[in-house]
Structure formats: C-alpha cells, structure tokens
Image: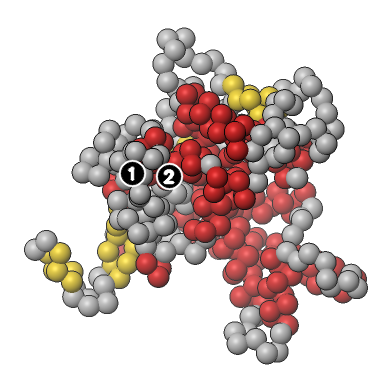
Amino acid sequence: TDLPGDMADAAHDCAKQVAELVGAFNLEDYVPLCRGWDLQGLGRRTRGVHAKFDALLETMIKNKGKERREVADKANAKDLLDILMDAAADPTAEVKLTRDSIKAFVLDIFTAGSDTTATTVEWMMAELLNHPHCLQKLRTELDAVVGRSQLVGEPDVAQMPYLQAVLKETLRLRPPAVFAQREAMQPIYVRGYTIPVKTSVFFNIFTIGRDVTWWEEPLEFRPERFMPGGAGEDVDPKGQHLQLMPFGSGRRACPGMGLAMQAVPAFLAALVQCFDWEVPNPPLDGGRGGAGECQEAAACAPSHAAPSSTTPTINCSRIPLYPLALSFHITLPLSYISISSGINLQHAGLLGTRILGR
C-alpha cells in the first residue's frame, strides 16, 4: 500500500521505536522483585507505541476500504492489505480474519520484516565498502550476468553465485537474529546435561557463526568460502546446516526466509549496479575500512552502533537510461543506514527512488 508522506514517516518512526524497545535491557527480566513496577518506563513507552501503531493501522484499513469501494475494477493488482481484506470478507474461508488479525499481520511486516531486512542490507554494504576487492568482484559479476542494458531484479539472483556468497557471509558474520529459542517438549540429554521438559533453550547463532570449529579465520569477511571449492560451498543458510542457521531451523524457522533470500540480495545488487560508492575520508594507509569499525548496537536486529555515511554517485554507464530523468553529474550524499526502511533515499529524490523502485 502506498502511504502518504506523513503516514510513511509515522510508520517509520514507530518501527524504529519498536526495534529499540525490543533490544532494550529490561531489569524486570532479570530481577523478579522489579516486575510490575516499570522502573525504566519501558512498559509505558511500549503502550504508547502500540497506541500510535494501532491508530496508524486503523487509518490504513479505513483508507483502503474507501479506495476499494471507489474502484470498480477489482481485477487490478492487489497489495498485501487487499489480500488480507479479501480473506476477511470471504465467508467460505477456513480461518476467519478479524480486524485485529489484519492489524497484527501488517504490524509484523512493519516491524519484524523491515528491521531485519534493512539491517542485513546495511551490513552487506558496510562489509563491501570495507573490502573494495569484494565490491569489485560483485560488480564484475553484475556486468557479466545482467549487463548494462537492464536493471537487476530478483530473477537474476539465482544466476549470481558471488552475490549469494556475499549474503551468506554477511548472515554468518552479522546474523539479523542473535538467538534462536526452542522449548523442550520432553527431557533431553546433551553431553551429560539434562534439559528438563518445558525448558527454554537459546541457540547462540552469533557465536556459532564465529566458531573456529566450523570456520577458518571466522572474524574475516570472506565470501569466497561459500564459492565452489570453498570450505562452505555446500553450506546452506536455510537451516539444514547447523553451523549456519540465521533463520533458525525446523518447523519454527523464520517464515520470511524465502522472501529475504530473494529480496535482500536483489536490493543490494541494485545499489551496487546503480551507484558508485565512495567513503568520505578513507584511511590514508590503504588499509581496509572506511564504513566504520562495524560495531553492533542493541536493537531488534543488531545494527551499527553509529550511523555511517557514504557518498553514492549515480552511474549512468551501468543502468538503462529510459527510467531516468537523467542528469550526468548528480552526486547524492546520504547516510545509507536506516533501521526500519532499508536504504534511506530521503535525500536522493525522485531519480534515486525510480532507480531502485522501478
């Protein structure tokens, strides 16, 4: 659903606050005596954000209902909200969707889907900027597979092994979810330890991805390890190999895994194809770096501790000219960090939006 500017800003702000609250240290989780007192004000803030989000979603649903009544041709392309409202209005549906169900579904998309996706793209770009030779390899692959006569899209991802290797290496080194939680349905015995029934078990995905038992030089960003001939050539991030499970594993794995494996690399590829990236004040010694020290900060998904800035320049030689209101000398300074909406194109204007959104 296309949102007016003020509603889009409000949704972005709410999603950002949700990410901050989920990642905040809550004393009540560790000191039972403090439960119910809301000493840090997190409960009050959470209720406030929920009220704002609920009002925003109510407005979206009302606007969509009005739009659907005014548009006679129901064969037009439908967005997610259309599909949910159709399901709610279907008397033969096995599962009856309520208004609250629709709100909850859209809320999940706004929060769980946007923050993790944006953070992964952010880390991928930061690592590529810190490793220019990897960025150049990806550009070479883009030119070979997609060429310069069309924009890269999701169907191209399957034909780009190095792009997929960059994604896997980023998910290994910077997983969007640090832990996966499961509950023991029966007593389990692991290496001399007894895990009683109903016990919550947390799998440290972050640490597993940096374990020297599985990974050579685990702190190094090296996509080549997932290329043919590399040690991780056959390792898949979809939960079949426990040394790399950024989406969890089994029936309770992340439901957005398939979408992420397509949309995230396609989005990054568009950024690399359409822009030349320059890091302000690169290191004079020629060493790696430039996008920052890549320190994680607490949030719904581990993000940069401090926003990094780059200067992307539209590369007119790499993209088809027909979608653009062309200018051959535009340089677009912007911070590519955005916690909930992906790459921040606020300063890029219509030109950049059309390049990436086509």
Q: Which residue is mark 1?
A: 232
How far apart are the two marked residues, 2 and 1, measured between alpha carbons?
10 Å
Rendered position, 46 above or below 311: below
| Residue at x 74%, y 60% (from the top left corner) | 1
Which amino acid, mark 1?
Gly
Q: Which residue is mark 2?
A: 168
Q: How is the image coloured?
A: secondary structure
Residue 194 % position (x, y): 13, 68
The x and y percentages for residue 303 are 47, 41
Which element carries disc 2, helix, strand or loop?
helix
Quarter of the C terminus within the rendering: top right
Q: Amino acid at mark 2?
A: Lys
Q: Is residue 233 above or below residue 102?
A: above
- Circle 1: element type: loop
Query: Which residue appears at 70% of the width and 48% of the height?
Result: 9
State left or right for residue 219 relative to residue 197: right
Badges 2 and 1: C-beta atoms under 8 Å apart? yes
Residue 316 falls left or right of residue 284: right
Q: Residue at x 63, y 65 (%)?
A: 106
